[in-house]
Image (spheres, helix red, strand yellow):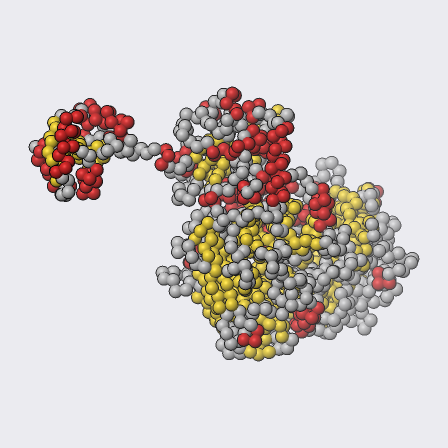
Amino acid sequence: MNRPHRGAAGSRGLGTMEVKSKFGAEFRRFSLERSKPGKFEEFYGLLQHVHKIPNVDVLVGYTDIHGDLLPINNDDNYHKAVSTANPLLRIFIQRKEDADYSAFGTDTMTRKKNVLSNVLRPDNHKKKPHIVISMPQDFRPVSSIIDVDILPETHRRVRLYKYGTDKPLGFYIRDGSSVRVTPHGLEKVPGIFISRLVPGGLAQSTGLLAVNDEVLEVNGIEVSGKSLDQVTDMMIANSRNLIITVRPANQRNNVVRNSRTSGSSGQSTESSLPSSMPNILANSLQGEEESDEEDIIIEDSGEPQQIPKATPTSESLESLTQIELLHESTQNGFLPSSEMNLNHSTGSVSMEYEVQDPDHRSLEEDGTIITL
Amino acid sequence: MRRFLRPGHDPVRERLKRDLFQFNKTVEHGFPHQPSALGYSPFLRLMAIGTRSGAIKLYGAPGVEFMGLHEENNTVMQIHFIPDQCQLVTLLDDNSLHLWSLKQHSGASELREEHRFTLKGPPGSPPSATQVTAVLPHSSREVLYLGTESGNIFVVELPSFRVLEDRTITSEAVLQRVPEDYCNRRSCELVEALQEHPKNPDQILIGYSRGLIVLWDLQNSKVTHHFLGSQQLENLYWQRDGSKFISCHYDGSYTQWPVSSDNRQPEPLENLVPYGPFPCKAISKIYWQTTKNGLPYIIFQGGMPRASYGDRHSISVVHGSQQTAFDFTSRVIDFFIIFSSEPAAEFDDPSAMVVLAEEELVVIDLKTAGWPAVHPPYLASLHCSAITCSHHVSNIPLKLWERIISAGSKQNIHYSNMPWPIDGGTNIAPDPPQRDLLLTGHEDGTVRFWDASGVCLHLLYKLSTVRVFLTDADPNDNMNTLGEDEWPPLRKVGTFDPYSDDPRLGIQKIYLCKYSGYLAVAGTAGQVLVMELNDEDAEHVVDHAEADLLQDQEGYRWKGHEKLKTRDGPVRFEAGFQPFVLVQCQPPAVVTSLALHSEWKLVAFGTSHGFGLFDHQQKRLVFVKCTLHPSDQLALEGPLSRVKSLKKSLRQSFRRIRRSRVSSRKRRGGSGNASEVQEANAKFDQDALQEMELAPVQRKIEARSAEDSFTGFVRTLYFADTFLRDSSRHCPSLWAGTNGGTVYAFCLRVPPAERRMDEPVRAEQAKEIQLMHRAPVVGILVLDGRSTPLPEPLEVAHDLSKSPDMQGSHQLLVVSEEQFKVFTLPKVSSKLKLKLTALEGCRVRKVTVANFGSCKTDDYSENDLAVLTNLGDIQIISLPFLKLQIRYPCIRKEDVSGIASCVFTKCGQGFYLISPSEFERFSLSTKWLVEPRCIVDMPEVTSNNHVHNKSGMDNTARKS
């Protein structure tokens, strides 16, 4: 393939461009006027003509400078292909009926050989359903399991990210009763349970919540002793950043925790969770401010903008005491989370978490603390 | 997580909190819900009312009030005072008897239950054998006679309730000497009435239900007289001298019987069916009162002709040729006559008749010609038309107070001048610290002004807005005009009238400026009236304007009620508050918020569609702002389409009640009697719902969105003079908060006083804040440079408040149902917040700034927010740092109407409805506490300390 490459380089100066087109196992070479590439339809006709396949519907693709296989199906991407071809325009033609769509897309370079082999050997090529898969970094997370290291294995803390999307949170809760181990033996106590997941809702799409899971906490506040309506109101009030701690009805998918990893936070070994999930989620349970939770102001009928935080003046004393308290507890030392037992309270969970992971302590929690 | 970081309790602040805050339910105002029994002690001059939820309330002179609650929460059937004692016995519908006494404790009297007792028959006897039907406390004060269903009369000793079996009066003993033929016809039935002989305490009159009446001699344990009545007996009454008694019967007749030593089986003297000859209803109780002039008063309940007037609740008073059948608005529970109880007095000389009807107390002056009603100082029927809203104004200037009273006194001319006849006990509570007004808006378009300064909630003045409008009910069409010769001579008495001519007239919002006397009132059909206090009658035209809140938006159709039609031409108004401006919102949806600025002469009003500002000086609409979300069809269509959601919410509240039965029991034993009565009422209501079978409850978890219904609903309006545009110039402003979490701020330009009529008021929108949590905005407040809430209009001008600090920067406090947020002004940046719902799962229902003074030092006071949540808790939150100070459970969370009706005062008190007819008063402050404190002295028969309480041995106990 090197020889024609060099030859093409020589012809570049003439304003023409070398085209190497491949259909099945056959190659055709021809040249095009770089300045006047013409229309895609003409080019398509030309390809059919040179490959002698006048009545076959085909897909036309080219490899760009990054080695990605990109489609040519209109004037725009045809012109793009022509203008970026350096020095040679490599065209790949597939029959429409056995086209492999997955071959197209970014980052196909890494798979190039594979792609080429697919393209080259159409017989070999698997008929996959048409699924568009994109990369995780292109998306915001919709849910995560957090605080695995500090929670008992039977519990799961799930964070649902509502953002501004229209997708409903999509679940219902009900009253129920659960059995607790108390000093007086087993005791039936009232509890709150997930009663229904709305199909297509956020809760269902995460796969982390299920019907009959018992809700234990909402954003760090224990729900025991609270009525169904209170818990409903708490969840709705936190709906933009909802963190619910549940005891899943199905205990077989629990996160298996290695006690040695207890120092690091939020790293989940749950297989269903992409490993690229950001780790910043775990640092606070509630009260935390996110920019998308800020109110909006329109001044003098102008453009809406988010309301900034005021610089603190009078409350700084209180914030100081908070920080001091925090340091103090660090010195005193707290139980490592791995030794925590089932009977912990919410308060202790959060506190201990704060202490062991000072880098993540809730500096963004309150505007008054940030500035210190 | 912050709450875990909160530093420990600051001991100084904790101590201060104890000096500032304290929660008490102090007194119940209004008329007891579902009264079931009445009792009166001529000796103590106290009246007792029992209710179906087992409460017992004693009333004497204004301010003298006691309350007790039977643990069983059963209906109180009968109340009997023990003669010449501070004691009373109650009979409940579970056949238990309870002895209550008034005892002095640390300088004030208290009502306490001493003993309880249930009559037990021999084993194997039917329950009816001991079912008590009549109670007679004997004048010896040592025994109670208990007539039963079996016809036996048991004697129990007081106060031990020990049964004296040897003294039981069996029906066999009574029937021994009854003529054979009479006896065969009718066996002894239940004991209907027991009356002690007025002169001879050894004789009691026993009436059996089938008509037999006997006079029983206690000394010899035998019958002395037989009175062979032929009609089913209802009640008996002795004449004062004991020579005659009167019996009343089921067929509407009454009979006089002579009692003399020569005839042991007399024939009746007179038998009369007062409203015959056609069949009549029973006469259930009768009084025969002698007078000096010889003509007796015969007063009886019922007896109306069955066919044509059988549905009337009447009590007839006959005095010579005068006869009136008082026609009550609701069922008569019981009544008594106040008459001379001096034993030496020869005649009864009745002075007043006290009637307890199901919905109100009516007192008739029998001494004044025409028998006018007496205006009661307490037990007011708050619900004479259903209460739709309330508004409290503290510390009324004396001038306004007097003008309102004078306007009210002109309305009360038809009342008797008689001093309140039930005047036992002494009120020793300190005088109320200030004059407070509670204004209640009613379904019939009236506003009632109540003196809420002290223990007795007293009606001062009643304002009707109906006159401004054309309604179906013609005022000339008087239903009561009965001709002279009308028979029976019915006369309507009482004020209870739950039927509204037109629901659109209902009052929804009230705002009174106590300095200027301007009153703004807004109603169900989008009507806003601005009124001025005028001491004279006047006839004038009410200026009329319309505010189109939809502002020509296309495609909307209002499916609700039409706006009210107004009267053309001048209207005559009586002295008092007289409307001069009427603004009608279009569409005529219910007015949901109202604000009046008496200094700027502006009134702002909001509905579910938007809000508007009206200049009532120039009588010009300044602007309107539509807040409606285009997708909000529900708000557009009006109340008709809400029927479905109302149904849903009813269903949900039923479910809540059901679920909470367990938790409400747990909560019990809280703060004193008042809450216990409510618990009892609640239990009563819940029992009624018990059978309802309901589906399992689940709740949807969904974030609020901008498209939710009723987001445009204007929840709060607020006027403030503050820095809206820049920090150098402050200006008048109007703030509005909606159900969708939006706050609008308008900059106002109000011309100076000298050019006020020449230049128009201008308004321009300056800011719009959208709270991202989108919860309804329930309160907006501006704090001045010293973080003090801005004073009310004209407060500074009247030297009643320091001028606000305009040097330091102002802050804006926005209270939504879920969060409290403080923003800086004029540039809006968020400064502080308290996320109440996220932390506690409760939502803000009512919020007010209240001033709390320390009970220890006079010079310390602070402003805090008093907050009522949807769980019925009251929280106090500090200003300006939004720190939760204290929390008290106050109203049951299932009591939706109680929570909705709650109104806070400016000095840390509050009111809420515990029933349609009763306000509970509570206090959060250590300093301001209005509660009954009174003494009932035991009037010693020997030493006559209290002349008016002097009473003799004559205590004709009556069946109540």
Percent position of residue B937, x then y: 84, 56
- How many numbered discs sit on the rendered protein? 0
- From what the image shows, is residue B574 above or below residue A268? below
Give the camera-side residue of A248 and B214.
Answer: A248
- From what the image shows, is residue A338 above or below residue B862? above
Q: Quadrant of the C terminus of chain B?
A: bottom right
Give the camera-side residue of A69 and B448.
Answer: A69
Residue at 67% x, 68% y: name it: B798
Residue at 60% x, 78% y: name it: B538
The answer to whether residue B504 is visible is no
Q: Quadrant of residue B385?
A: bottom right
Task: Answer left or right for A120 relative to B504.
Answer: left
Percent position of residue B686, x then y: 59, 45
Residue at 48% x, 66% y: name it: B763
Give the camera-side residue of B416 and A4.
Answer: A4
Give the camera-side residue of B453 and B281.
Answer: B453
Residue at 58% x, 31% y: name it: A355
Percent position of residue B49, x then y: 72, 55
The answer to whether residue A27 is visible is yes
- From what the image shows, is residue B546 above or below residue A347? below
Percent position of residue B499, x then y: 56, 63
Q: Quadrant of the N terminus of chain B?
A: top right
Q: Quadrant of residue B406?
A: bottom right
